[in-house]
Amino acid sequence: MSGRLVLGGAPLGQPGDVGPRLREVLATADVLAVEDTRRLHRLAADLGVTFTGRLVSFYESVEQARLPGLVAAMRDGATVLLLTDAGMPSVSDPGYTLVRAAIEADITVTSVPGPSAVVTALAVSGLPTDRFCFEGFLPRKGGERRAALAALAGELRTMVFYESPHRLAEALADAAAAFGADRPAAVCRELTKTHEEVRRGPLGELASWAAEGVRGEITLVVAGAVAGPVSMSAAELAAEVAAEEAAGADRKEAIRTVVGRTGLSRRVVYDAVVAAKGA
């Protein structure tokens, strides 16, 4: 009799985001494969859940060694719940190898969906959400990071990255060099937690802000490239800026929005506004 693998979406920061299904599986699973056993105990205490399943540590440096035992347990009928520190397992977290191993062993893989920093940051960023791509963590080494960003310079979709707070300023500076300092972006810090902050603005300004030091879990959202500069008259550009101002934006923010939307330079849009005022 074959068991199953359940991928559980752990809260990003607020235990109250966990629904009743995860509470149930947490209490009844035969095996709990977790990235950090201390976090599991804390989460269970916060949720008021008592678990009776066997605990197995499952983090990056040991996951390969844990696969045979977990697959054997599922083949014997066990339900294995996989939990990482936050969000959905296997998304820049341990889990992909276990999912593949279970599929290859013809074991059912299912999920209790929950929070995800990727889609949460995308949703609150204020950037286009109709098409996006997740690029995970940027390379740690500067040369490799700059090469990776250069390869994405023409990407039309909104891009989502994870980044360490210690490398954020360098990553933003490299992104500004690769995409342009005016490219709109959002730094989402400590999502759903007490000190949650979403800092929106052009990459150049965000790089200057981050240079002062940033703490916490970081998700970076960057607007995609514009397919090509839009052909618009000065009057049309000025009207676009005026419309943004009418919607509540100040002059600087309105110009920035039109620059991002049209792909035209800031100077071109600014000159159009000045010309319209003098007309």
Image (cartoon, rainbow, N blue to C red):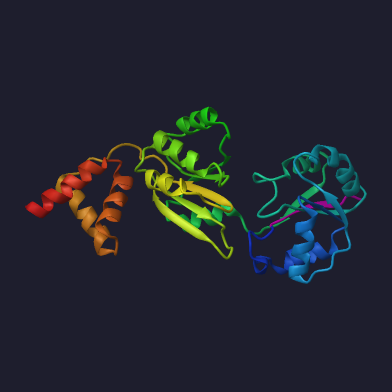
In the image, taking residue 161 as reference, residue 199 lies left or right, namely left
Does 198 sit above or below residue 157? below
- Residue 263: horizontal and vertical position, in percent? 30, 41
Of residues 232 and 210, the one nearer the viewer is 210
**111 or 252, which is in the foreground?**
252
Residue 156's spot in the image, x, y percent? 42, 39
Pick out the residue farthest to the left.
Answer: 279
Q: Residue 8: say if magenta.
A: yes
Label total for image: 0
Q: Which residues are magenta?
A: 1-9
Q: Can residue 208 be seen from the camera position used here?
A: yes
For the point 85% across and 38% down, which residue is it?
65
Q: Is residue 205 magenta?
A: no
- The answer to which image quadrant residue 19 occupies is bottom right
Query: In the image, 27: left or right of 264?
Result: right
* Residue 223 visible here: no
Q: Nearer the viewer, residue 259 or 25?
A: 259
Does residue 120 sit above or below 138 in this rendering?
below
Q: What x and y, as percent, mark residue 135?
A: 55, 40
Q: Which residue: 48% across, 34% down?
A: 149
Can you give x and y, in whole percent of width and height, for residue 31 in the image? 86, 54
Q: Is residue 84 left or right of residue 213?
A: right
